[in-house]
Amino acid sequence: MNDYSKPARTRFAPSPTGHLHLGGARTALYAYLLARKTRGQFLLRIEDTDRKRLVPGAEEEIMQGLRWLGIQWDEGPDIGGPYGPYRQSERKEIYQRYARQLVEQGHAYYCFCSPQRLEAMRQEQQRRKEPPHYDGTCRRLDPVAAERRVAAGEPHVIRFKTPKEGVTTVRDFLRGDITVENRTIDDYILVKSDGYAVYHLAVVVDDHLMKITHVIRGSEWLPTFPLHGLIYRAFGWEEPTWVHLSVFLKPSGKGKMSKREAADLMKDGYSIFIKDLRGLGYLPEAVVNWIALMGWSYDDHTEFFTMQDLIEKFSLERLNPAPAAINFSKFDHFNGLHIRALPPEELARRVKPFFLERGYQVDDQRLLRIIPLIRERIGGLDEAPDMAGFFFKEDVVPAPEDLVVKGLNVAESLDLARRVRKVLEDLPDIRAEVAEPFMREFVAQSGLTAGQVFGLMRVAITGQKVSPPLFESMEVIGREKVLQRMEQAIHLLEGLLQSEEPPSKSLDTTLES
């Protein structure tokens, strides 16, 4: 059991080698929740020692994504802190010092093997169908002689001197003890020939020096987990609580979700990248709610959580190591729930950019009146312009065929449109509580159905077959514009009727026949 009365120090340590994705966001979220629940600290550390794979702008994108989700760090590369620097590229000398300490204590050694020798060794191992591993040539070098070669400037790396006898047991919070035979653990490189530490050394040194109490990370680190345990023990340091999270599966449940599927998902309006979700109309609150439940649960029925709810209810014991299939339908469901939970003023603020992006001139007061009409009818913020753009248009031009009422021909539809306009013109005002009773009385007397009459009105007034509630929409649009749009519908039906009438035969044709 974890003691939640003690402040936890957690961290999210991404590599700026690509976009922040759902898996990374979930890791950051869980670490953040644990820190906030225990009134501890949450750190952001950038692990950028792999210089060849760095992507320009990725670090800033990661920060923007976390901020959008509502995940704010207490220490990090942008705000500093007592244990900085918080970029690994700025901690090169620190890692070299600790690597030399391991060499001096006999837990690591200098390796002078050339890339050509290592490649030949790998090929020979493949030929013998052995797993790739370092053969230990430099492990057997005299340490004093090795030091002289380093002092002379000979290119080298530093490798960890893994014990070759016995077993190593490490404990994962979710999976319990994991035991491996030491002979299966390679002598991993700790410091490359360019002087930069690799992840295995840097992560251990940083987590220790930054006093991290809980390491929450992806399960892709399980294969090298024993190595990290061995490095901690070589230094004589206390290990943190290790928590390796479940993997994400494809929506089908078959196979691990990977970045390669992203392009196909975008065709369906989905993405695994945080940067895309905002433009796709998702709320950060919905993203947080959704990813929190992919690997964690509070009970077997509660599904709606705000960030504050999660902070209060989160526990490591409720994490599930079983793989979790990404369910985008559930994501849409959560997005709808959180849209409807927003106060009208806040929802108006969030949908406004989507209207502006589509070129609409948005009046804030009118937008606020529209929100109650659409909030139950949109599953994403991006759907608002399609649902309610007609409120901000001077006029709408529906397809004439859409004005032809089901069960009526063009002439009958035209007659209905004229009668409807007359009723609307004679109304004392256009408020919904006034207009709707009058129009329902008209329907009752017409011998038609409400669907026929109101369907014609909806297309004429909104330009759409599906819209927010008709009479409330008419009230927002205003009397004058409603009448103008009905008049235009009449003209469109008149044009359609004329195009359907057969041309009269000419005198010559008549005589010939």
Image: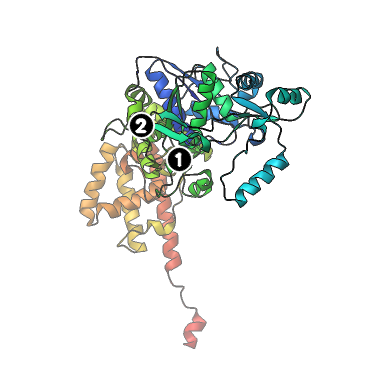
For label 1, the crowd category at 10 Å Cα-Cα, with few meaning under 14, some 14 to 19 and many 20 or more, is many
Q: Return the x and y of residue 278 as percentages of the image width and height.
A: 48, 35
Left or right: where 224 falls relative to 33: right
Point out the tag, 2 or 1, that comes first from the N-terminus: 2
For label 2, the crowd category at 10 Å Cα-Cα, with few meaning under 14, some 14 to 19 and many 20 or more, is many
Q: Return the x and y of residue 450 as percentages of the image width and height.
A: 25, 51
Q: Contact (CB < 8 A) between labels 2 and 1?
A: no
Q: In the rendered view, how is the structure colored?
A: rainbow
The quadrant where residue 477 appears: top left
Q: Amino acid at mark 2?
A: Leu
Residue tagged by mark 1? 382
Residue 446, placed above or below residue 274: below
Q: Residue furthest bottom?
A: 512
Q: Amino acid at mark 1?
A: Asp
Residue tagged by mark 2? 319
Q: Is residue 378 at all visible to an observer of this figure?
A: no
Q: Residue furthest right?
A: 152
